[in-house]
Amino acid sequence: MAERAQTGPKPDAPEVEDFRSPRGIDLSLIIVNWNSADFVRNCLASINPGSCAHRIEVIVVDSGSFDQCGGMLSREFPAVRFVQAPENIGFAKANNLGASFAAGRFLLFLNPDTEVVGNALERLVQVLDRHPEAGLAGALLHNFDGSVQTSCIQSFPTLLNQFLDSEWLRGLFPRSPLWGMAPLFEKDPAPAAVEVVSGACILIRRGLFEKLAGFDTRFFMYSEDLDLCRRVRAAGQVCLFVPEARIVHHGGGSSSSARSMFSVVMMRESVCRLFLLHRGPVAALGYRCIMAGSALLRLPLLLGKGGIQRMAGRKARSGAVRKWAAILRWSLGLESWAASKNGSALSSPKTAGVGSTASDNSSCVA
């Protein structure tokens, strides 16, 4: 892997600390790029130096996409530290790699397809400074149209909430503890303790992150944020949701190719891995069965005559059929490639921690 160093920022670039500066850093902002250089540019441009009193450094890791992101940063944001991974090492491992270069008291993991609104960074740091019992904090995420992304907080997955999960039920019972998103509907803007915050924007104490050996690289992509929040809470720390810190999250910036079947399958594989690691092999098998049952229930409805009327157009119906067919194949063990992307559930999280490159190809079903 290589890194690039440049001299002082251009006048119109965010005034982040040059990574070679000897001054103390409060906040290390880490962004992982994979074929999303344009998103990275917009994300960095959204950082308003006047809205944050803390010293910030920015580290961008390219996870083997070689999409000219480094060149763009060199020209437009030369104070940003750029780290090039030789191949696609996965989201968790790439974030750990970025963290290994960080000097800040706090680490902020930010998706490339996000934009910072106002003083969001300052508010997040303030909250952790004022709440020593909290080890991690997340922001309120908005879609590009201003609507709230309800997935920015959630409950840790259980077989029950995965079995019942649907937009219809979430709409009927939005405050149910099954979903863990009740704080989104509170009028009080005070920080609230939650089970999980979205990995699109996670602020964590650097010492705690190192103690936990970083993100678990047995997750290639997806669910690494759920796992980290679970381990933070197991360590006796609180995960806080900070509604006054607002971030726009465009969603899927690095894997937006029409919500590819790769993403659909990897998401289920990662949740299955999560069940295996935290709830055991029976729960992991139960999750597969739930996904198989959901697919078998939905596919006949989508393929039937009524499915055409319920879906907004033939293209949407076709996409839904492809999605649930892929989930059915995965649940039956016919997408074995997905298991090889994630590391072995039998390996130690510590050996798969910050800066590690080890992985193997064990399936999530014991």
Image (cartoon, rainbow, N blue to C red):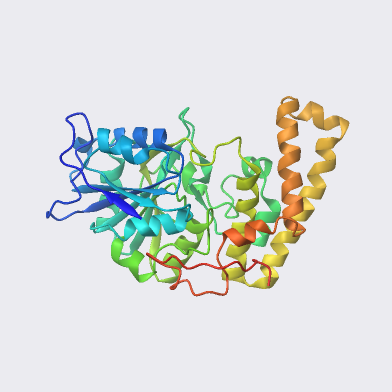
Query: Which residue is depicted at the point 36% across and 55% down?
Result: 1
Q: How many marks?
A: 0
Q: Is residue 146 above or below residue 134?
A: above
Query: Which residue is depicted at the point 49% across and 58% down?
Result: 224
Q: Position of residue 272 (x, y in %)?
A: 63, 61
Q: Nearer the viewer, residue 158 or 251?
A: 251
Q: Nearer the viewer, residue 133 or 359?
A: 359
For this orientation, the residue located farthest to the right is 305
Q: Nearer the viewer, residue 343 or 324?
A: 343
Q: Is residue 129 above or below residue 366?
A: above
Q: Is residue 147 above or below residue 236?
A: above
Q: Position of residue 204 (x, y in %)?
A: 34, 58
Query: Which residue is depicted at the point 23% across and 48% down?
Result: 57
Q: Is residue 293 left or right of residue 197?
A: right
* Residue 366: quarter of image: bottom right
Q: Is residue 238 left or right of residue 221?
A: left
Q: Position of residue 137 (x, y in %)?
A: 37, 54
For this orientation, the residue located farthest to the top is 313
Asked whether the viewer can see residue 215, the reply is: yes
Query: Which residue is depicted at the point 72% across and 55% down?
Result: 330
Q: Position of residue 345 (x, y in %)?
A: 57, 70
Asked whether the viewer can see residue 204, the reply is: no
Q: Is residue 162 above or below residue 6?
A: below
